[in-house]
Image (cartoon, helix red, strand yellow):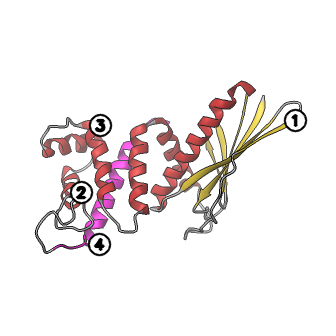
Amino acid sequence: MDKFTFRSNIMPAAETGYTLLIPPFDVVVRENTLTLTATAPAADEDRLEEQAEEVAHDLARSLSYEHSERFEVTFVSYRILHPNGLLSVVSHLRKIAKPALISAPSTVDQATLQRRSDRARRAGRNADLRDMLDHWARYAADPEGRLHPLYDVLQVAERLYAAPREPRKKRHQKIASALGMSSADLDALGDLTNNPTVLNGRHPGAAPGPHRIATDAEVATCERVARAIIENYAAKIVV
């Protein structure tokens, strides 16, 4: 059996070093370096390389959701330690920007690490959860605070649980029933993000003035409901 070590750059840099288990990899995050190791037959090299990149991106999705800040990974290299002691190295030379440190606690408790691992594993098993997390990462990275990506989270749920031409009320009732949520909350997310007088909504300027930016309370409602959709859906995915 060969020992594979995959290394990626992750930005922003981690708040502290920690380890995770995301099968089949042992994952170590230290500053701006993400290292995944696994033991497998040499014939599995291509499959394992592809899987390592998927796990790295799923972890970035999990961190983006947790910190409300977009995390990105860039594959750097991998090496294979063969049973005879020989070492093979495959390098992907790319320009890596100077990492930025996030503002976060100096330690990470075990419960947080478990949530990160579980969320990444669930994303690896479900394309719809990956879509939801990608929409959240887009929202977190937008300096204008546009609410469109949070509505996109709701649209993934509509795609999963409702028919396209059903009335909105019925669609939201189906989602609420499936995810254990309030349909009124789903209505609020839809109403706020689609309000044409809200400049950071989906249809800015589509209505006659006056126009305005969504209030802090409205933004908090949109974030809370989108997070509830993500978390309640993720909980349904078996890992």
Query: Which residue was labeled with disc 4?
Result: 216
Q: Quadrant of the N terminus?
A: top right
The image quarter in which residue 91 lies: top right
Q: Which residue does the image show at 89% across and 30% down from the upper left?
A: 84
Q: Which residue does the image show at 15% across and 45% down from the upper left?
A: 168
Find residue 189 and name its label: 2
Of the residues shown, which amino acid type is indicated by label 3?
Answer: Leu
Q: Is 203 rendered above or below residue 44?
A: below
The image quarter in which residue 158 lies: top left
Q: Is residue 80 left or right of residue 198?
A: right
- Tell me how far mark 3 sits from mark 2, CA to CA: 17 Å
Query: Which residue was labeled with disc 1?
Result: 86
- Tell me how far mark 3 sits from mark 4, CA to CA: 30 Å
- Tell me how far mark 2 sits from mark 4, CA to CA: 14 Å
Of mark 3 and mark 2, the one earlier in the sequence is 3
Rendering coords of residue 99 (x, y %) = 62, 65
Of mark 4 and mark 1, the one earlier in the sequence is 1
Q: Are marks 3 and 1 in contact (CB under 8 Å)?
A: no
Q: Nearer the viewer, residue 143 or 119?
A: 143
Find residue 160 and name its label: 3
Q: Are marks 4 and 1 in contact (CB under 8 Å)?
A: no
Q: Specify whether residue 23 is in view.
A: no
Of mark 1 and mark 2, the one earlier in the sequence is 1
Of the residues shown, which amino acid type is indicated by label 4?
Answer: Asp
Of mark 3 and mark 4, the one earlier in the sequence is 3
